[in-house]
Image (spheres, rainbow, N blue to C red):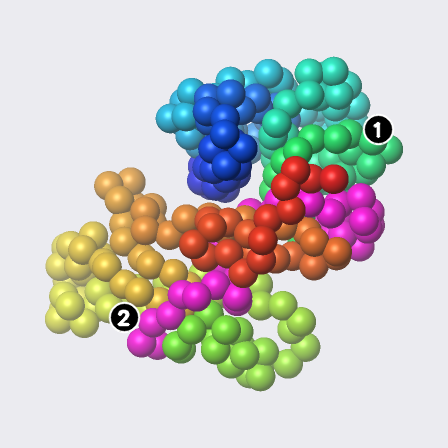
């Protein structure tokens, strides 16, 4: 989870360079729930900010009930950061989107977790245009592998197999990819011996419809970045990382 909003830091750095500025000039405002997931996300953000020399002008913990973000957004209005990051699960995302609209908060780049789970597009409409929403996977990505083919082909197969899905949950794609990893490891280990299979897993190097898969020392996938989708006219379009983007980033957010 520490990589959830890290892509937004890299994107802000890219945009600063395109504007002829040093990435270290990017000023970041952060509002995070005080829970293990959000604090893990925050740690990842701070690591990436450090790489670019960025500074946090707001670094707030959200109230426990996540029902009011006004104190943080008042600071944001006064300090005018270049990037606003919010992580507070579904309730925090809904509160953030609502109060950004009510308080007329204008920040060039806004990224938050749980956009879809909070149904912010449905609830707050055009006010959410320009928001960046991280996801593990999207069907428009150009990822492909031997099993299932491309991301788009997997998406089509899933929807034809399991009727009623308008969108394929990334968790389903993730679970399918996990099965492919196990299959590959068992075949290379040629054994059910725990140590041999574990050793095979550490040497995983796969290209799949879900993206590249290769594990670091901590057991996390180090080969696939988090993807950022931007809300554009009520649709979620992949805009970063730039090499995988299917749509152009709307920046600065209007």
The answer to whether any part of residue 117 appears in the image is no
14 relative to 146, above or below: above
Q: Sequence-wise, which precedes: disc 1 or disc 2?
A: 1
Across and down, in percent, residue 104 comes to 83, 31
Q: CA distance from mark 1 to mark 2?
A: 51 Å
Q: Is residue 27 visible?
A: yes
Q: Residue furthest right?
A: 102
Q: Which residues are magenta?
A: 118-147
Residue 132 sits inside the magenta stretch: yes
x then y, percent, for residue 129: 73, 47
Percent position of residue 115, x then y? 67, 48
Q: Residue at x 33, y 59 (%)?
A: 212
> Residue 135, image x and y in percent?
54, 52
- 112 is within the stretch colored magenta: no
Residue at the extreme bottom of the image, as rendered: 160
Element at badge 1?
loop
| Disc assigned to residue 183 | 2
- Nearest to the eye among marks 1 and 2: give it: 1
Query: Element at badge 2?
Result: helix
Residue at 50%, 49% (x, y): give it: 240
Residue topped by disc 1: 103
Other residues around mark 1 within 10 Å, as few (<14) / some (14–19) / many (≥20) = few
Quick one: quadrant of the C terminus? top right
């Amino acid at each position: 989870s520490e990589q959830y909003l890290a892509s937004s830091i890299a994107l802000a750095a890219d945009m600063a360079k395109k504007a002829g500025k040093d990435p270290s000039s990017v000023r970041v405002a952060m509002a995070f729930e005080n829970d293990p997931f959000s604090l893990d996300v925050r740690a990842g953000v701070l690591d990436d900010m450090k790489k670019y020399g960025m500074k946090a002008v707001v670094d707030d913990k959200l109230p426990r009930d996540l029902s009011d973000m006004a104190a943080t957004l008042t600071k944001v209005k006064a300090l005018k950061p270049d990037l606003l990051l919010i992580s507070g699960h579904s309730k925090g995302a809904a509160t953030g989107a609502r109060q950004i609209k009510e308080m007329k908060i204008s920040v060039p780049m806004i990224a938050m977790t749980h956009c879809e789970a909070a149904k912010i597009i449905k609830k707050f409409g055009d006010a959410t245009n320009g928001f960046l929403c991280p996801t593990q996977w999207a069907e428009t990505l150009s990822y492909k592998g031997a099993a299932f083919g491309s991301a788009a082909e997997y998406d089509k197969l899933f929807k034809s197999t399991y009727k009623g899905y308008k969108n394929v949950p990334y968790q389903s794609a993730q679970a399918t990819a996990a099965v492919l990893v196990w299959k590959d490891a068992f075949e290379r280990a040629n054994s059910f011996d725990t140590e041999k299979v574990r050793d095979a897993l550490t040497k995983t190097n796969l290209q799949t419809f879900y993206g590249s898969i290769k594990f670091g020392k901590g057991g996390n996938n180090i080969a696939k970045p988090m993807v950022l989708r931007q809300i554009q006219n009520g649709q979620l379009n992949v805009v970063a990382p730039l090499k995988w983007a299917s749509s152009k980033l709307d920046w600065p957010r209007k």
